[in-house]
Amino acid sequence: MADKDTLSIIAEEIASAFTPIKDMEETPDAFRSSMKELGWDASQVIQPVQDLMNLIDPIITTLETGEINFGNITQLLGQIKNLVTAIAALSSKSDSLFSGLTATATEFKNDFPGEISQYVLVEYFLNQRPKVGGLLQLLGITLQLLQKMLLVPGQFISEKKFISIKSEISSAIH
């Protein structure tokens, strides 16, 4: 096997971080369960979130080829960019597309894009890089752990609040 260049390795790792979104939407029950894990009560699959599958599938297909190289790196990076853009664009979708939630569409549109980004990072570290994820969890750094300990469901934390909480924990320990 030829040595991979650094950019290919980084792109492959970034792309693999988004695969938990695919698992979220395998079935309606899996979707509701994943949404519950994120703190949202959904009675049905939310169409704009389901639409993300059209952008995740090509990423997974590219990853499944097993070879990220100069020939397909630009394509993979474009696919990742399209997915990240679509996640951010959820906040500008019509409220009528977000039926099936107990929360308001505005609340979901404002919070979910940031939450799903945090979710994929936590899942990536815990599942793809378990040594790093375990260490971060042991140190109390993963956002998922902090959410369960300190926050109500559906309210992931901003970086500013995370730094504040981390500082408070550090002060309490010392």
Image: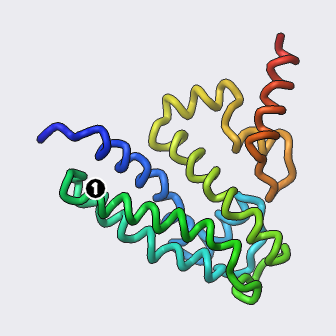
Q: Nearer the viewer, residue 35 or 55?
A: 55
What amino acid is at disc 1? Answer: Ile
In the displayed structure, 111 sits above or below 142; it is below
Estimate the x, y position of residue 46 in percent, counting from the top left. 66, 79
**Which quadrant is home to the N terminus?**
top left
Q: How is the image coloured?
A: rainbow
Question: Outermost residue, top direction?
Answer: 174
In the displayed structure, 74 sits above or below 118; it is below
Instruction: Give the residue displayed 71% in from the left and 29% down from the top.
Output: 140
Estimate the x, y position of residue 162 in percent, counting from the top left. 77, 37
Q: Quadrant of residue 174?
A: top right
Instruction: Give the residue displayed 48% in from the left and 74% down from the top.
Output: 53
55 left or right, relative to 67: right
73 left or right, relative to 158: left
In the displayed structure, 112 sits above or below 67; it is below
Estimate the x, y position of residue 84 in percent, counting from the top left. 53, 62
Estimate the x, y position of residue 115 in percent, counting from the top left. 69, 57
In the displayed structure, 8 sits above or below 21; it is above
Residue neighbourhood size for the residue with mark 1, other residues' Cα within 10 Å, grouped as few (<14), some (14–19), many (≥20) = some
Instruction: Give the residue displayed 56% in from the left and 66% down from the top.
Output: 24
Q: Nearer the viewer, residue 147 or 26?
A: 147
Q: Which residue is labeled 1 in the image?
A: 73
